[in-house]
């Protein structure tokens, strides 16, 4: 898991994988590009230690939710590009829906709808 | 270490591709980041630093990524193992103690399991051993059948493919040179075919070759006998040899690894059972008498799809028919099926009981060893808690650290297991080569096989996991920051911890073992001084079988008288007796006796089943058996005189109510003969040491002649010499041999001392004692290492405190109490618990060991003393260390 820095929180388990899968759904990418992408999309709110991406990628590879092959990037360097697989897509859909439900629940608890007090 | 570097190359070549990719990938990732940062205007050095910070700990990332795949590659295992080896090399004392402890325990288990395997698990060397069953009487643990009964069972049963029968016999063999005695297995014609065997050489005898007694004078040699006595001579087939002076033709040689169907009993050859009368064997067993049960075992291969229950019912039905048809000969005829190897339940029962007991004790040893190692490991983990904390603080995962610990445990267990197995193999080889009974073809083939090795290795690994798991909680609970800050905080003295529980358990186990072994040893000492009812001193036995020299019953009596006279003429001989067999020799048989007023002489109406001995006049004096009242037999007690008997006191009590009331009274034999009691002897032991008092009857050998006899020759003890080797065994034996040769040169003779003849029956208690003694010593050793480990550990942790105590003027004993009080307390608790358990355990021993009673003050004192010694030895060095604490040195160190 990414290390906690002061002022940021640890991600919940599986969050990083979810974001990786989401990025890969848009387009296949190599590790460095994935980090860049996640940091930009999150407007740098999430401090992902770059290294922690790799164990996550290994987990996804092992679960056959992504596949990887060596190739050459647009900037002409040797890179290992990851692609989401069909089962990765299914897994992502499922993750997102459960995550949204959870997030909704937390939001409801933290900001209860305005109810007339008096 | 060159080979390790080779190994590394090998490891690299096998490395999983994914991991290679991974490190490449990460390197490229960092390069990319560095370029990016440089583009943003940082210097190369600064860019590299930033990139590394952003990426995090490369090695850790690698490891975490690698862990995802969960298949530790050969290389990672190897590197773990190398690390563990380094760690272990750093503490040779710990490593040595751990390996030795485990090797002992695994070795003991391997030996016991190997014996168990050979006794109970290993099937016969035949085609379908799992379908072979032995017939056994339903009401007793014996399997003897008569030949007519066997034929009926064979022909009427619908459950077995081939019902075979076999028995063992000793015959005189002449194949050129001196006559020798050999053990043979006499088997029915269907024996080899029924077992599905193929000859190594020549051919076997078959059922169709038999046409009644004397029609098949053929023998089949065992491979071993052919190899040792006929030097692998292939031209042997067709040669004629003489058994008991009768010609027999050698048909062939049995397969190499087939040693008959009796466990450990390796016959020299097989003879058709129908030749038994033709051998003129001494026992007068024939093929016609239905009531004469002399065939040792009957067995057969179950037909396919027949269950044991069906077969038993089938046999019982035949038994019931036979009971109806021959009420005079048959008593209750029911059957049980048993495994054929251990002579059915005859040996199977006691052997199984003892082996399971032994297996239990050795498992306890292993458990004790595990407890011991567990506490060693826990102590080690505590000693290394700072190192562990440091590694945790530097970002190692707890899993990683545990893996290291487990790797060490597994390494120790593998090495210890291998050492233990090697030791056990050496021991078992010796056992297999050993001939415990010189006169019997008994080979304890207990060599380990793959099953044993596998079990030993498994046990070692399981133990490794067991004791490796002890410190897990400790490591998981380690808080890196606390531990690093505090210099060394022992958790000593507060509450009870796991290690102490383990130690108490282990000491208790060891005390059980020590108790059992002391009880066994005490029992053995008792048995050496047990009252046998005969003398063993200055006495020789000479076994002869006149039938082997071609004598029949008619000529035997005269010859026996001559033999007695010949022995008496040897200078220095005081008394000579002769009997068909003597107590503790094999071959004593039971007989059935009835009260004088019984008319219906069916077995179920019998009053007693005494052991019967056929003796010549003068036997009691020679054997040293006291006549309490009445008289000995005389040479006038022959066939023309009234039938007389001498009984022992137990017999007198059972039949006539008292010893004094027995003289002159009558009892009936199963043939309806009335026998008059003319003498009463003291009681004795007749078969083995731990037997209950049993009735015995002696009859005159002149009235019921026997051809195979044992001479009892007692030499005069020299005045003034106290030891019983006062007579010269060898010269007396030579004199006896030459005298007997003069009488008949063709008669094989076996001469041994009376003391040696008891050894056979001492075998079981001796073995039990040796086994338990070894286990007891092992238990004591384990206790010592366990207590030592704990005491040494507690002293080393509390050195500073002890130093302060000394500085403040504590007395020696106060220091010792502070340092070792707890260890001693644990020892006491464990010993008491073990003693109590041991008293229960020894009840099991009473079956084997003579007078094994734990309620023996000597034994109790012995256990206490032994455990005390254990404690003393174990705490000696730590105590020295505690006493030699120098507070000044300690303070300087701080």
Image (cartoon, grey):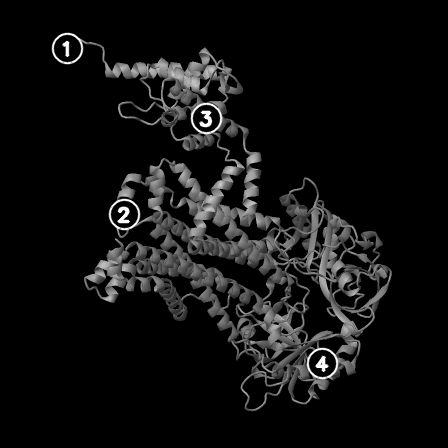
In whole angstroms, how far apart are the C-alphas of marks 2 and 3? Answer: 39 Å
Q: How many residues crowd mark 2 within 10 Å: few (<14), some (14–19), many (20+)?
A: few
Instruction: Identify the mark at residue A117; answer none if there is no mark.
Output: 1
Q: Nearer the viewer, residue B34 or B495?
A: B34
| Mark 4 or mark 3: whose residue is earlier in sequence | 3
Q: From the image, state whether disc 2 or disc 1 is nearer to you.
A: 2
**Mark number, residue B177:** none
Instruction: From the viewer's side, name the closer residue of B719 and B693.
Output: B719
Distance between mark 1 and mark 4 Cα atoms? 128 Å
User: Toward the viewer: B147 or B842?
Assistant: B842
Q: Which mark is residue B638?
A: 4
Q: Which residue is mark 3?
A: B26
Quick check: B85 above or below B684?
A: above
Residue on which the image places disc 2: B487
Give the foreground label among 2 and 3: 3
In the rendered structure, are the residues bearing label 2 and label 4 in contact, judged by CB atoms less than 8 Å apart? no
């Amino acid at each position: 898991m990414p290390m906690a820095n002061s002022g940021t929180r640890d991600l919940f388990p599986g969050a990083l994988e979810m974001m990786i899968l989401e990025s890969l759904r848009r387009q296949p990418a190599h590790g460095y590009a994935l980090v860049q992408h996640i940091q930009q999309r999150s407007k740098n709110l999430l401090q992902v230690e770059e290294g922690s991406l790799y164990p996550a990628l290994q987990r996804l590879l092992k679960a056959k939710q992504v596949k990887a092959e060596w190739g050459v990037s647009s900037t002409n360097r040797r890179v290992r590009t990851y692609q989401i697989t069909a089962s990765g897509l299914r897994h992502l859909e499922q993750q997102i829906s459960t995550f949204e439900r959870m997030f909704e629940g937390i939001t409801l608890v933290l900001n209860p709808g305005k109810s007339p007090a008096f | 270490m060159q080979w390790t570097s080779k190994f590394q190359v090998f490891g690299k070549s096998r490395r999983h591709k994914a991991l290679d990719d991974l490190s490449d990938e990460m390197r490229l990732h960092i390069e990319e980041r560095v370029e990016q940062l440089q583009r943003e205007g940082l210097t190369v050095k600064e860019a590299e630093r930033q990139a590394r910070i952003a990426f995090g700990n490369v090695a850790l990332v690698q490891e975490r990524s690698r862990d995802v795949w969960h298949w530790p590659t050969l290389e990672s295992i190897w590197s773990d193992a190398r690390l563990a080896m380094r760690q272990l090399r750093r503490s040779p004392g710990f490593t040595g103690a751990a390996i030795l402890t485990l090797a002992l325990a695994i070795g003991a288990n391997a030996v016991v399991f190997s014996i168990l395997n050979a006794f109970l698990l290993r099937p016969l060397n035949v085609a379908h051993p799992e379908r072979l069953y032995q017939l056994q009487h339903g009401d007793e643990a014996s399997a003897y059948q008569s030949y007519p009964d066997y034929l009926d069972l064979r022909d009427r049963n619908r459950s077995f493919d081939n019902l075979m029968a076999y028995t063992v016999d000793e015959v005189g063999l002449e194949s050129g040179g001196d006559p020798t005695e050999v053990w043979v297995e006499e088997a029915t014609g269907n024996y080899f075919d029924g077992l599905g065997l193929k000859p190594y050489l020549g051919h076997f005898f078959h059922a169709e070759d038999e046409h009644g007694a004397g029609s098949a004078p053929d023998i089949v040699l065992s491979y071993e006998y052919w190899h040792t006595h006929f030097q692998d001579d292939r031209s042997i087939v067709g040669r004629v040899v003489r058994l008991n002076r009768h010609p027999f033709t050698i048909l062939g040689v049995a397969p190499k690894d087939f040693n008959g169907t009796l466990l450990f009993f390796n016959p020299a050859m097989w003879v058709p059972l129908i030749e038994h009368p033709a051998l003129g064997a001494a026992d007068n067993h024939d093929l016609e008498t239905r009531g004469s049960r002399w065939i040792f075992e009957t067995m057969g291969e179950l037909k396919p799809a027949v269950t044991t229950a069906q077969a038993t019912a089938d046999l019982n039905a035949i038994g019931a028919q036979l009971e109806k048809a021959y009420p005079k000969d048959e008593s209750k005829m029911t059957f049980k099926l048993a495994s054929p190897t251990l002579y059915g339940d005859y040996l199977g029962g006691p052997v199984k009981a003892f082996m399971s007991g032994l297996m239990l004790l050795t498992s306890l040893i292993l458990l004790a060893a595990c407890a011991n190692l567990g506490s060693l490991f826990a102590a080690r983990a505590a000693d290394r808690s700072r190192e562990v904390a440091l590694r945790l603080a530097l970002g190692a995962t707890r899993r990683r650290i545990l893996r290291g610990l487990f790797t060490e445990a597994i390494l120790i267990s593998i090495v210890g297991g291998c050492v233990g197995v090697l030791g056990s193999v050496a021991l078992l080889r010796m056992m297999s080569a050993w001939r415990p009974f010189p006169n019997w073809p008994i080979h304890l083939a207990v060599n380990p096989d793959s099953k044993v090795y596998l079990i030993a290795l498994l046990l070692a690994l399981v133990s490794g996991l067991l004791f490796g798991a002890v410190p897990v909680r400790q490591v998981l609970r380690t808080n890196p920051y606390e531990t690093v800050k505090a210099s060394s905080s022992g958790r000593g003295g507060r509450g009870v911890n796991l290690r102490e529980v383990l130690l108490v358990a282990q000491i208790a186990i060891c005390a059980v073992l020590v108790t059992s072994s002391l009880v066994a040893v005490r029992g053995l000492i008792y048995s050496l001084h047990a009252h046998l009812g005969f003398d063993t001193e200055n006495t020789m036995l000479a076994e002869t079988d006149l039938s082997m020299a071609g004598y029949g019953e008619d000529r035997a009596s005269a010859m026996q008288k001559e033999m007695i006279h010949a022995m008496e003429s040897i200078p220095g001989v005081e008394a000579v007796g002769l009997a068909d067999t003597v107590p503790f020799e094999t071959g004593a048989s039971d007989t059935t006796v009835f009260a004088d007023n019984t008319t219906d002489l069916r077995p179920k109406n019998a009053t007693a089943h005494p052991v019967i001995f056929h003796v010549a006049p003068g036997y009691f004096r020679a054997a040293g058996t006291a006549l309490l009242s009445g008289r000995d037999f005389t040479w006038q007690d022959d066939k023309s005189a009234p039938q007389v008997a001498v009984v022992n006191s137990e017999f007198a009590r059972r039949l006539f109510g008292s010893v004094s009331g027995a003289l002159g009274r009558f009892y009936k034999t199963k043939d309806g003969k009335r026998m008059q009691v003319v003498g009463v002897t003291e009681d004795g032991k007749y078969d083995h040491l731990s037997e209950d008092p049993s009735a015995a009857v002696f009859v005159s050998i002149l009235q019921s002649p026997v051809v195979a006899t044992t001479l009892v020759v007692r030499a005069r003890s020299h005045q003034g010499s106290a030891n019983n080797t006062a007579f010269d065994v060898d010269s007396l034996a030579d004199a006896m041999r030459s005298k007997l040769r003069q009488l008949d040169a063709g008669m094989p003779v076996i001469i041994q001392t009376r003391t040696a003849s008891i050894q056979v029956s001492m075998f079981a208690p001796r073995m039990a004692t040796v086994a338990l003694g070894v286990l007891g010593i092992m238990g004591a050793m384990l206790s010592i290492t366990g207590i030592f480990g704990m005491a040494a550990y507690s002293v080393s942790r509390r050195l500073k405190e002890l130093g302060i105590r000394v500085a403040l003027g504590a007395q020696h004993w106060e220091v010792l109490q502070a340092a070792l009080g707890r260890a001693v307390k644990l020892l006491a608790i464990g010993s008491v618990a073990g003693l109590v358990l041991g008293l229960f355990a020894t009840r099991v021993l009473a079956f084997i060991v003579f007078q094994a009673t734990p309620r023996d003050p000597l034994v109790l004192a012995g256990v206490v003393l032994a455990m005390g010694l254990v404690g003393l030895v174990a705490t000696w060095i730590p105590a020295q260390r505690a006493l030699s604490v120098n507070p000044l040195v300690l303070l300087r160190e701080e």
